[in-house]
């Protein structure tokens, strides 16, 4: 046996195979060349699968990842559903704080139920974040008939950082008002 020849073991009987063996001399099982070719096929399949083109994720979809809380995922799901309702913009202001672009927006609407209010606010927050390229968005929803009694204030940071830029571990933060 030459020292520069490679060897392997038979997968069936564990008998020593030489580099040139196509099958095991002991049990006649397929030799390592067949095994290597199967391994090569698997490796090629993995490379192809990993490099398959994927549709780009929207910013809203990126926001829902393993870092978000269950509540974040719930709010995200609501914001993409049928609960979202039309609203009327009252005021929108942009500012900067700690190198972060902030947008504060106030809306009025006639909304029924907490899920509808939350879905609409979350949808608006994500929409404003994209349109204004803001890192932090604050949405206040008022009932249509009065602008002095907010229903909900929802804060949204796509990167999971609050207004100050420090990691908060959540994307959405909500304050509900009851009267």
Image (spheres, rainbow, N blue to C red):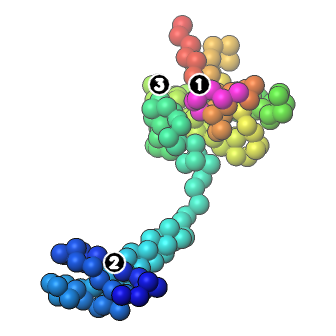
Question: Which residues lie in the magenta part?
Answer: 166-173
Residue at horizontal 71 percent and vertical 27 percent from the top: 166
Mark 3 = which residue?
114
| Helix, strand or loop status at disc 2 | strand
Quadrant including the C terminus: top right
Task: Give me the C-alpha separation between circle 3 and circle 2.
Answer: 66 Å
Kindly indicate whether the residue at mark 1 contacts the one at mark 3 (C-beta within 8 angstroms).
no
Residue at horizontal 52 percent and vertical 28 percent from the top: 117
Residue 116 visible in the picture: no
Whether residue 169 is in magenta: the answer is yes
Residue 72 visible in the picture: yes
| Helix, strand or loop status at disc 1 | strand
Residue at horizontal 52 percent and vertical 43 percent from the top: 65
Task: Give me the C-alpha separation between circle 2 and circle 1.
Answer: 60 Å
Where residue 129 sits, quadrant-wise, is top right
Mark 1 = which residue?
173
| Helix, strand or loop status at disc 3 | helix
Where residue 26 sits, quadrant-wise, is bottom left
Is residue 33 depicted above or below 132 in this figure? below
Task: Give me the C-alpha separation between circle 3 and circle 1.
Answer: 15 Å
Percent x, y for residue 71? Answer: 47, 30
For discs 2 and 1, the disc positioned in front in the rendered view = 2
């Amino acid at each position: 046996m030459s020292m520069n020849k490679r060897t392997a073991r038979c997968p069936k009987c564990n008998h020593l195979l030489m580099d040139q063996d196509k099958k095991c001399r002991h049990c006649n099982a397929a030799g390592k060349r067949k095994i290597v070719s199967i391994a090569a096929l698997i490796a090629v399949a993995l490379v192809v699968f990993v490099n398959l083109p994927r549709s780009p994720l929207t910013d809203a979809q990126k926001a829902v990842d393993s870092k978000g809380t269950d509540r974040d995922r719930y709010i995200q799901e609501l914001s993409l559903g049928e609960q979202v309702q039309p609203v009327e913009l009252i005021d929108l202001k942009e500012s900067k704080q700690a190198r972060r672009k902030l947008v504060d927006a106030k809306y009025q609407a006639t909304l029924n139920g907490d899920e509808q209010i939350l879905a609409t606010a979350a949808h608006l927050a994500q929409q404003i974040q994209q349109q204004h390229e803001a890192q932090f968005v604050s949405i206040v929803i008022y009932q249509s008939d009065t602008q002095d009694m907010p229903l909900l204030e929802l804060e949204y940071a796509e990167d999971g950082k609050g207004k100050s830029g420090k990691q908060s571990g959540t994307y959405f933060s909500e304050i509900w008002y009851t009267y």
